[in-house]
Amino acid sequence: MTLFRDEGVVLRTQKLGEADRIITMLTRGHGRVRAVARGVRRTKSKFGARLEPFSHVDVQFFSRGGDLVGRHLPLCTQVETLAPYGRGIVDDYDRYTAGTAMLETAERFTENEGEPAVQQYLLLVGALRTLASATHAPRLVLDAFLLRSLAVAGFSASFEDCARCGLPGPNRFFSVSSGGAVCFDCRPPGSVVPAPQTMQLLSALLTGDWAAADAAEPRYCREGSGLVAAYLQWHLERGLRSLRYVEK
C-alpha cells in the first residue's frame, strides 16, 4: 500500500455506483491515470467540484498494490486546485468544444496508463491556459494544440520543405499520407493544393507565431482546420468524437 502525489489535468469522469466517480487524468509524473474518487457526487463532498474536466489539480493517490496500474484502481484521497481552467471555458461554446477536443486528443495520445508523458502534459496545460484566457480564437488554439500534439507523438507535419525528398519550400501540394507539404515530383494521388496563406498559417501555429496566426483571414483558417483534422484522423486511424461539435 503506497501513497503517490502528482499534479494533473482532469480529462473526463465516469459515474461509479451511487456517489463515486472514476476520474481519468493526465499527470505530470505518471502519465494517464484512472482513479476512484469516493463520494464526490454527494452535495457535501469536500473536493467533488475540483475533479471536473479542465481542472488542473494537485492529487494524492492511495494505491493498494504499490503502483498506479493494476487490478485495483487507486483512490484519490486529497485534491488541491492549481488552476480552475474550466471557469474560463465551459461558459463559451466555442472554447468548450475546442477544449473538449483537446482533452480527448490528450487521452488518445497517452493510451498506456502509468507511462510518463511530460511533453503532452505540459502542452495540454499551456493550451488550456491560453484557451481559458481568450487571447486567441478558440479554433486557432485547438489547431495549434493538435499540430504540436502530433509533433510530440512523432508525427510532425511539414508545411514548407517536401516531406518526402526534402526539396526546400514552399511547395504547393499537401498530402496527409506523406507527412504534409510535397513537391511536384513526389506528390501522390489525392494530394490537395491549399492556398499558400493556409500553409503559412499552419506553419505559424506549429511554431507559435501568434502574430501571423491571429492576422490570418477566416477562409484560410477554415481550410487549415480541415487539413489539421484530416492529418490527425490519418494518424489516429479514427477521428475524434468531440471534433464534430467544434464550429467550422
Image (cartoon, rainbow, N blue to C red):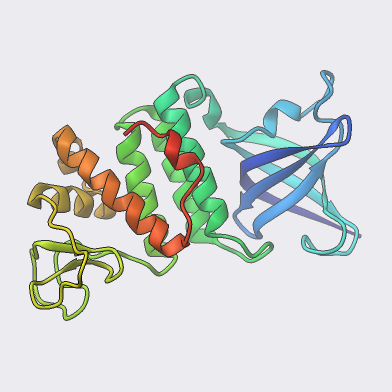
Q: Taking 233 as reference, is 158 above or below it?
A: below
**Front residue of this view, candidates 98 and 67:** 98
* Residue at the extreme bottom of the image, as rendered: 165
Please tell me whether residue 242 is drawn above or below residue 194 in the rendered image. above
Task: Locate residue 100, reporting x and y percent.
Answer: 51, 37
Q: Foreground residue, 12 or 133?
A: 12
Q: Is residue 72 left or right of residue 5?
A: right
Residue 127 on image: x %, y %? 42, 42
Q: Residue furthest front?
A: 189
Pick whichever, 53 or 233, lies toward us: 233
User: Residue 9 in the image: x percent, y percent?
Assistant: 60, 43
Residue under the image location 20 percent in, 36 percent down:
214
Left or right: where 158 falls relative to 123:
left
Instruction: Report the quarter where the C terminus lies.
Output: top left
- Quadrant in which residue 45 is drawn: top right
Q: Is residue 120 above or below residue 129?
A: below
Residue 15 falls left or right of residue 30? right
Q: Is residue 210 visible?
A: no
Q: In the image, what residue occupies the spot 44% across and 23% down?
A: 93
Q: Is residue 216 above or below residue 70?
A: above
Q: Is residue 137 visible?
A: yes
Residue at the (44%, 21%) spot, across then down: 92
